Image (tube, rainbow, N blue to C red):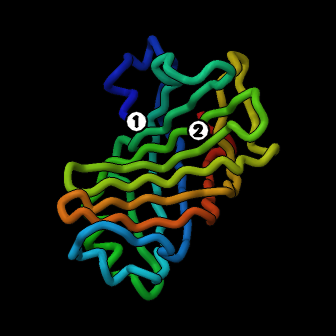
Amino acid sequence: MRLAWVCLLTACGGGSGGRSMDVSTSFPVTQFSGNGPSPLDPLNGQTIDISVHWDQTDYNNGDGSAPQGCKPLTIGYGFGVTTRTAHGATAQLVQSQILDRLDNWDVAFQLCDAAGASSVTLESTINELNLSFGCFGVPATAMKKNAQGFPELTSFTATQCSATILDVSNNRVLGNDNFSMQIATSPAQLP
């Protein structure tokens, strides 16, 4: 979701500056498929526990491709480097084989008129490795919009999340389809 490349921030609505964000989640790997072998194989059945921090964020309101009745907000990787940290028993493997390799992270937040259609997604990809966490459980308290009707991201816990981590080079997929993801913003709302 590299919308910053697709559109000019001034044309799509966007900006930056002194706003930080943290996204964290923890879930067991319950889906394991592909041919492998992969350096990620030891994560089968284990818990992945990560946090991603942006000191500053870039944001925009999309390129006009959102479904009808939905308004997007994309938070891109900040001006500085994101701090990506693995925790728990698998921390060393997750840090070296996933987080250290993925340096560009996006959060896409979409508010929709239809019940259950709003979503939040955390993504990072390189040619060899793809990561995507998506959630449809956006609480009513997070349904905040600005004067133009675009989302304002606040701190909340998203539920009904699913994860896909794809080791492209070794054809290995790890995932989970039932966990939560926490988002914390400072100041209280972005943008």
With respect to residue 54, does 189 lie above or below? above
Residue 156, percent across and down?
70, 53
Residue at screen point 61% across, 54% down: 183
Which type of secondary structure does the marked residue at label 2 adopt? strand
Any mark on residue 109, and which?
2
Q: Quadrant of the C terminus?
A: top right
Under mark 1, the amino acid is Met
Q: Earlier in the sequence, mark 1 or mark 2?
A: 1
User: Dot 1 corresponds to which residue?
Assistant: 1
Any mark on residue 86, and which?
none
* Viewer-nearest residue: 163 or 125: 163
How many other residues sit within 10 Å of disc 1, few (<14), some (14-19) or many (≥20)? some
Residue 99, percent across and down?
33, 65
* Viewer-nearest residue: 187 or 157: 157
* Viewer-nearest residue: 183 or 161: 161
Q: Quadrant of the N terminus?
A: top left
Under mark 2, the amino acid is Phe
With respect to residue 20, does 167 lie above or below? below
Residue at screen point 23% across, 76% down: 39
How many other residues sit within 10 Å of disc 2, few (<14), some (14-19) or many (≥20)? many
Pointer 1 with pointer 2, Cβ within 8 A: no
Which type of secondary structure does the marked residue at label 1 adopt? loop
Q: Would residue 53 be found to the left or right of residue 141 on screen?
A: left
Residue 177 lies in what quarter of the image? Answer: bottom right
Residue at screen point 27% across, 57% down: 129
Q: Would residue 77 be found to the left or right of residue 186 on screen?
A: left
* Viewer-nearest residue: 18 or 113: 113
Residue 19, percent across and down?
53, 42
Residue sitting farthest toward the bottom: 89
Residue 56, percent across and down?
45, 44
Residue sitting farthest toward the top: 11
